Image (cartoon, rainbow, N blue to C red):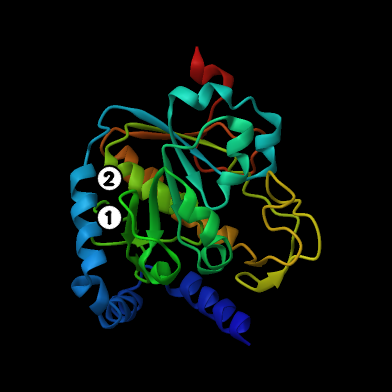
Amino acid sequence: MFGKIKAAKSKFIETYRGQTFYDLIAGSYDFLNGGSWFLDRKAVLSRNKIRKLKNKYEGERCFIIGNGPSLREMDLSSLRSEFTFGLNRIYLLFDKLGFQTTFLVSVNDLVIEQSHQELNKINSQKFFAWKTRKFINFDRNTIFLRTLARQGFYKDVIKGVWEGTTVTYVALQIAYYLGFERVILIGVDHSFKAKGRVHKTVTSSGGDIDHFDPNYFGKGFRWNLPDLATSKYAYRLAKENFQEIGRVIVDATVGGKLKVFKKVRYEDQFK
């Protein structure tokens, strides 16, 4: 039942996004649900931490590592000396990498509910959704972000972020705020073999074939089926906002299906 409601919501958003009355509804929802974000001590401290990061990496480049199976075809050892964003259960790759990503971003309720013990152990600078705070240890490496219903590319993440149905989009908003001039996407395959109603919550019956590790959403793991159309819309917003100030996002995913950003060869980024 809940999955059908989310699917209907997605259809409504796809039909009416950008129209004034939709923005009013979404904005009102965010306002009514924002009380704790403005008053809670952890939220206040998170906003203070975020302010200190504004444009800290101005002029630098970073890699945002998606979790697609294409990562298995890449030599990721060159990333050791780069600024990197890992997403969700990227920690399953850390032993093979030999290092942790510079940043880690996770905002999905189901992912955090089922993975919080591992996520809490990571030493990277971590960004989590405020709505999942009950699962997260608020340590010196943790920052909470407010996720908003009102769609957009939020240049000032202190105000919040829009999820865009993919954690990669949240990472792009953070990268913008931090000042990164060039963002290189890898592992953003934008293709899933699992089929069904968008946002439907499913339970994996076996090994995961849609991510870099069969244990990513392994047997018994609950997750939401993707909404690739909304993700694509969000990526276009990110591209526009980066371009308008002379910054760039490129896609070095091996065999990726996303057709929004300029395609580049991963190996060429290190020449």
- Classify residue 88 as left or right of residue 45: right
The disc label shown at residue 157, or none: 1
> Along the line of sight, which residue is nearer the eye, 52 or 23?
52
Nearest to N terminus: mark 1 or mark 2: 1
Amino acid type at mark 2? Tyr
Say the numbered circle drawn on residue 108. Answer: none
Q: Residues within 10 Å of mark 2 (few under 14, many from 20)?
A: many
Q: Residue at x 45, y 68 (%)?
A: 135
Q: Find residue 104 and report its horizontal and vertical position in percent.
A: 44, 47
User: How far, Cα to Cα, is label 1 from label 2?
Assistant: 7 Å
Residue 65, image x, y percentages: 53, 40
Q: Position of residue 186 (x, y in %)?
A: 56, 36
Helix, strand, or loop for circle 2?
Answer: helix
**Cβ–Cβ below 8 Å for labels 1 and 2?**
yes
| Rendered residue at 57%/42% (across/down) | 259
Q: Which mark is residue 177?
A: 2
39 sits left or right of 111 in the view: left
Residue shown at 56% from the left, 68% from the top: 110
Q: Position of residue 67 (x, y in %)?
A: 60, 46
Q: In the rendered image, which quarter is residue 62 located in?
A: top left
Left of 56 or right of it: where is 262? right
> Which residue, as the protein is rendered here, is positioned at the far bottom?
1
